[in-house]
Image (cartoon, rainbow, N blue to C red):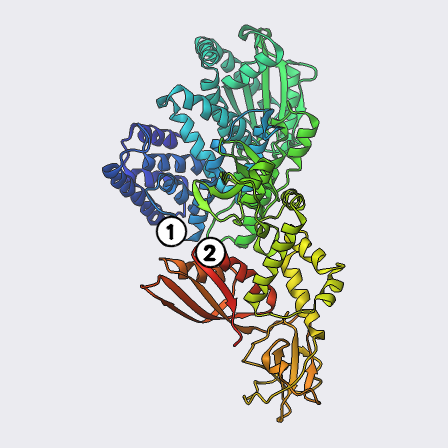
Amino acid sequence: MVEATRNQRQITSGVMNLEDWLQSVLDAREGLDVNRLRAACELASQAEQKALATVGPWSEGRSSYLTGLEMADILLPLKVDEASLVAAVIYRSVRENQITLNHVRNQFGAEVASLVEGVLKMVAISNIHIRHDEVVLGQTSDQIDQAKKMLISLVDDVRVALIKLAERTSAIRAASKTDREKQVGLAQEVNEIYAPLAHRLGIGHLRWELEDLAFRYTDPDSYKRIAKLLDEKRTTRQAYIEEVLALLESKLMLVGVEAELQGRAKHISSIWKKMMRKGIKFAEVYDVSAIRILVESPDDCYRALGVVHNIWRNIPNEFDDYIANPKSNGYKSLHTAVIGPQGKILEVQIRTEQMHIEAEYGVCSHWQYKSNESVDRSARYERRLELLRQVIEWQSEVEQLPASSKEVLANVSLDRVYLFTPDGHVIDMPPGSTPVDFAYRVHTEIGHRCVGAKINGRIAPLNHQLQSGDQVEIVTGDDPTPRREWLHSHLGYVTTSRAKTKIQGWFLRQARQKNIEEGQRLLEVELRQLGLDQYGHQELNQTLGYESDEDLLFALGSGDLELSHVVEAIARAASILKLDSQMNLGFESERRKPGLISGIGDRAHAIAPCCQPIPGDAIAGILEDSGVVSVHMQECVEVLNADVYGRLMRLSWQDDIQEFFKVNLEVMGYDRPGILHEIAGLFVTEQINISTLHSESSRETGHVEIQMSIEVTSITPLIRVLEMIQQIPNVASVRRLAG
């Protein structure tokens, strides 16, 4: 602890010898890779020097490098692992864009990079309006409650929370060098979010330091007054404590209890809370001093308690047995209050050495980070994750909230994402929500006028899945006209029922004829893209449950019926189209692929290269002279011209096909840098393999033609990727080629 204090003074003064600091770390923690820690320090130092030469310091009087060392010093007593110390040293440099996350990953590994990235996500907490019962989007919202939920949603490794605690501790220690507004904002954040987090993790010494420092800035006059009064009574209080300890030590020796006795002054913030809670003045707070008794065993705790109560009269209702009934964060101790010498109230804590370590360092006291540890790493991480999940209870910090709010906090759902509005408020939405969902959550009119979105200040696609901590800004147009494509689930624009209902309601209110025309247009475009020119109207209507073509097209145009369902039904309905003649294809058969086709018995089959049918297409077979069945799309010219006399076969696809099928596509558009990269990127996202790709552009006309062959398992992913390509800027058309 002395070494830590010396390090703190050196870091604060800016006079830091790296080798001395590394040696102090090794003295505190054996077995660390000092070379790895040195490399992190040197990287942070070099990055800062380079940043100073170009853009200047990130904060007046603050050093990202020294802040990293201070964070590591704060974490050392918590027994965190080597990866956490390295992440702490370089975190601030990454935060200030002096080092990239990729650089960290390449030099120190994925584990360190993941920890730094996790702490970076928690920066979003600082942007929250720290207020209770604030009206957000027309509803009363407890933003502190939302902040705590966001904290849990962002963190999946308890080490991330510890690094963030260290960073906030360092920040509020240095708050005296900032302006008043920043001091108050930081103090509110620490008091409402991070001090309770430290308490919930059982890290007592950090909790009290954070609460005292926060109180210093939220109410500086009261802080200074109590601190002055405590200082004035220090000599008298010290003499009183020495008298008490001497008497108590002698009495414990008589009954054979070996104990370590400590005297301490209560924390300033706890004194203030007691004054406010009881409505009393400082002069009436008699228990500003407390003593702590550390013994060897739980039995000795109760024996020591008996000694204390025999010496002094205990105060009724001021005894708590946290050994038999530990607190929710694992805290164990005996608490009692007695009327001590001179009639002064004396607070006494009795605990074992192990209980004391757990009270000071909480969850961290249980961690082991030895290289020869036999416990599997993944199992250790699971334990840490479970410990962090316990933080969501926040039981002792939410006593002022109504019962309903406590219940929400105790059962906070981890299957929510917590998002920022542009003005810094937090709203929660289901996972998988998109900017369109967010727009309709803000206001129906905002949703109707939505034409784009910015996520964390950058333009993003409207079907981008939002993550906790994202700040979302909706770009609106003048014309309140939603896009029908939003209602097609395979495109991923809308996932919430609220948004879907609002969009469908808008289209239903439009003229019936307009919806019919739009449905016809959508269907024609989709059929043309897929190479499906014919279908049985009557059979299709019957299959989908509509009385007429107009009813079907109206449902499609209004968004009540999804386009992908119609196309799949067309493929099935096409199987009853009248088929005429046949001709010999004259190609070699592929190897037999069992389990794909129904209706061929035990005959071998081959997929026709002229039309390349895939699951979802309506198919027919032609029996070749060789005995092999060639499989075609039913609208293929070879089928339509086939001889029906014993040569044509009605076929269908079997269920649960895992085979890949080749499909040829043609994309026409207007050439620009990056268009080919964007198109190819879609297939990477959708996990669809591109077997061949050819692109040809014309400088004279500015046109580009892209032809490619892809591999899909069915028509459904094909429909989805065609729709997504059509949405890429500068793409004029995309269609499926016959062969």
Note whether 127 is above or below 690 in the view shown: above
Left or right: 490 with respect to 369?
A: right
Numbered-mark total: 2
Residue name at image x 56 percent, y 74 percent: 661
Residue name at image x 33 percent, y 40 percent: 23
User: How packed is label 1: few (under 14 Cα within 10 Å), some, or many (20 or more)?
Assistant: few
Residue 119 rendering spot, x and y as whole percentages: 46, 41
Q: Quadrant of the N terminus?
A: top left
Which residue lies under the disc numbered 2? 728
Determine if residue 550 is in view: yes
Left or right: 470 with respect to 598?
A: left
User: How packed is label 2: few (under 14 Cα within 10 Å), some, or many (20 or more)?
Assistant: some
The amino acid type, in three-letter code, at marker 1 is: Asn
Note whether 704 is above or below 16 in the view shown: below
Residue 548 rendering spot, x and y as whole percentages: 74, 60
Please tell me the numbered disc located at residue 350: none
- Say which element carries label 2: loop
Residue 312 rendering spot, x and y as whole percentages: 63, 13
Left or right: 47 with respect to 494?
A: left
Note whether 168 is above or below 665 in the view shown: above
Which residue lies under the disc numbered 1? 102
**Is tag 1's residue or tag 2's residue first in the polypeptide sequence?**
1
The amino acid type, in three-letter code, at marker 2 is: Ile
